[in-house]
């Protein structure tokens, strides 16, 4: 699993995914805490950013956020449009419609 390089445990990821398996139940703060990402070092948080930034643009865009859970486990559900927009709003502090590495780090560590 790609997130092993970030130091996340499979059991913690499974618990985080289970906590938001139903549409409308995703909460980024809860997810980051449950999977262990919020407790990781800055370097590990940056590694996670690189994994989620699938198109290697240097930003996490809305489509990547929609498929966020699937980066943790193939077959996980896509986020709903409402969840995706809320997630983007939480991380996009400069209002450019995408989440940069510094914005990502700040959001994960909230």
Image (tube, rainbow, N blue to C red):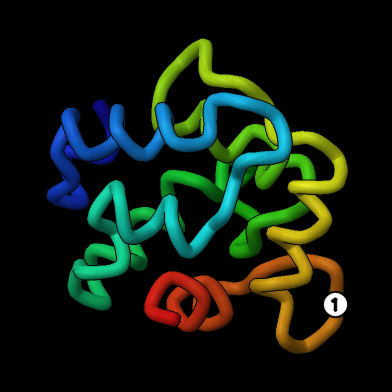
Residue 9's place in the image compared with 38, above or below, is above
Image coordinates of residue 38 in percent, x first then y, are 31, 67
As drawn, is 91 to the left or to the right of 97? Answer: left
As drawn, is 99 to the left or to the right of 5? Answer: right
Where on the picture, by quarter, is residue 40?
A: bottom left
As drawn, is 16 to the left or to the right of 92? Answer: left
- SS of the residue at dot 1? loop
Residue 16's place in the image compared with 48, above or below, is above
Where on the picture, by quarter, is residue 16?
A: top left
Which residue in the protein does label 1 denote? 96
Residue 55's place in the image compared with 31, above or below, is above
Give 59 or 23, whichever is nearer the viewer: 23
As drawn, is 21 to the left or to the right of 110? Answer: right
Give the residue displayed 68% in from the left and 72% down from the top.
90
Q: Quadrant of the C terminus?
A: bottom left
Q: How many C-alpha atoms fall within 10 Å of the one at disc 1: few (<14), some, or many (≥20)?
A: few
Give the residue displayed 20% in from the left and 51% down from the top.
6
Give 18 or 59, whichever is nearer the viewer: 18
Residue 51's place in the image compared with 77, above or below, is below
């Amino acid at each position: 699993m790609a997130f092993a390089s970030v130091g996340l445990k499979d059991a913690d990821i499974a618990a985080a995914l289970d906590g938001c398996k139903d549409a409308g139940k995703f909460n980024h703060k809860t997810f980051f805490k449950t999977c262990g990402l919020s407790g990781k070092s800055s370097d590990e948080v940056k590694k996670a950013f690189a994994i989620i930034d699938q198109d290697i643009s240097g930003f996490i865009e809305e489509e990547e956020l929609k498929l966020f859970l699937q980066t943790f486990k193939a077959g996980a559900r896509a986020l709903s449009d409402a969840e995706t927009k809320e997630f983007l709003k939480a991380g996009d502090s400069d209002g450019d419609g995408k989440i940069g590495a510094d914005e990502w780090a700040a959001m994960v560590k909230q």
